[in-house]
Amino acid sequence: MSQLDARPLLFVISGPSGSGKGTALRWLADFEGMRRVSTYTTRAPRTEERDGVDYNFVAEGDFFKLHESGEIFEYTRTYSDSYYGSPRALLDADDPAPQVVELDPAGFVRLSAITGRRIVGLFITTNTEEELRARIVQRGQGAEVENRLRIRTQQATWAWMYQYVLVNDVREEFLENLTTVVKGELLRTFGARRMLELRKELDPTLKTENA
């Protein structure tokens, strides 16, 4: 188990629109050494979004060229006919730096089956549908409320697969809980790596086997 826990960390954030995924991503990206991985999408950027940071915004034709080349290894199509794709960087287990990325539940499941990293799934949600509805309307997406709430119901059935389910009703409490979870997982990985180093120092055969 220690060997598995010593693998590079990948935090995957999922949840319905308006739950606070963007807040969580920005918060975790500020952790020392954390690398935020931007996924690809064919939808138009919103006013506050930055290309190459929030997403890699590409035309549909370019999106499928990237998929054919292997740069995008999996993708999904949303109810609005936009495509979202995961970059090959998420499969790289050679980079020891922890990573954080936003994926939908289907992408989380597919990635979990093939990546060489240790995945920690964080599902972000709210306590009530009314709170989520208010946030979606506040973001200027009122016309999409019912579709997004329907997706929330669908995604909620996937929450059990995640290691952590975090409720984002009070921002300060949410960020405090998020920080506690992430620090704990980072320490767990650090401890596992240190334990392996000590074992190699104490057992010369391990040095030979890993040379």
Image (cartoon, rainbow, N blue to C red):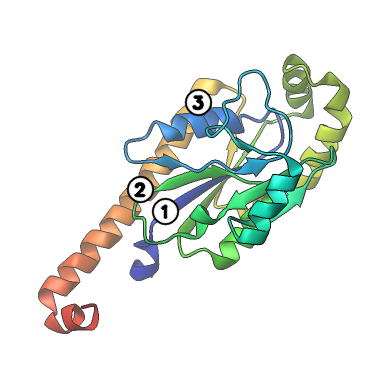
Q: Indicate which disc residue 186 carries.
A: 2
User: How many numbered discs sit on the rendered protein?
Assistant: 3
Is 149 situated above or below 182? above
Q: Quadrant of the N terminus?
A: bottom left
The answer for how far apart the CA atoms under marks 1 and 2 are is 8 Å
The 10 Å Cα crowd at callout 2, few under 14, some 14 to 19, many 20 or more, is some
Left or right: 74 with respect to 151?
Answer: left
Amino acid on which the number 1 mark rests in the picture: Leu
Say if residue 147 shows up in the picture.
yes
Residue shown at 78% from the left, 40% from the top? 82
Amino acid on which the number 3 mark rests in the picture: Glu
Amino acid on which the number 2 mark rests in the picture: Leu
Q: Which residue is mark 3?
A: 173
Q: Earlier in the sequence, mark 3 or mark 1?
A: 1
Residue shown at 52% from the left, 32% from the top? 53
Check if mark 1's residue and mark 2's residue have beta carbons within 8 Å.
yes
Say if residue 157 shows up in the picture.
no
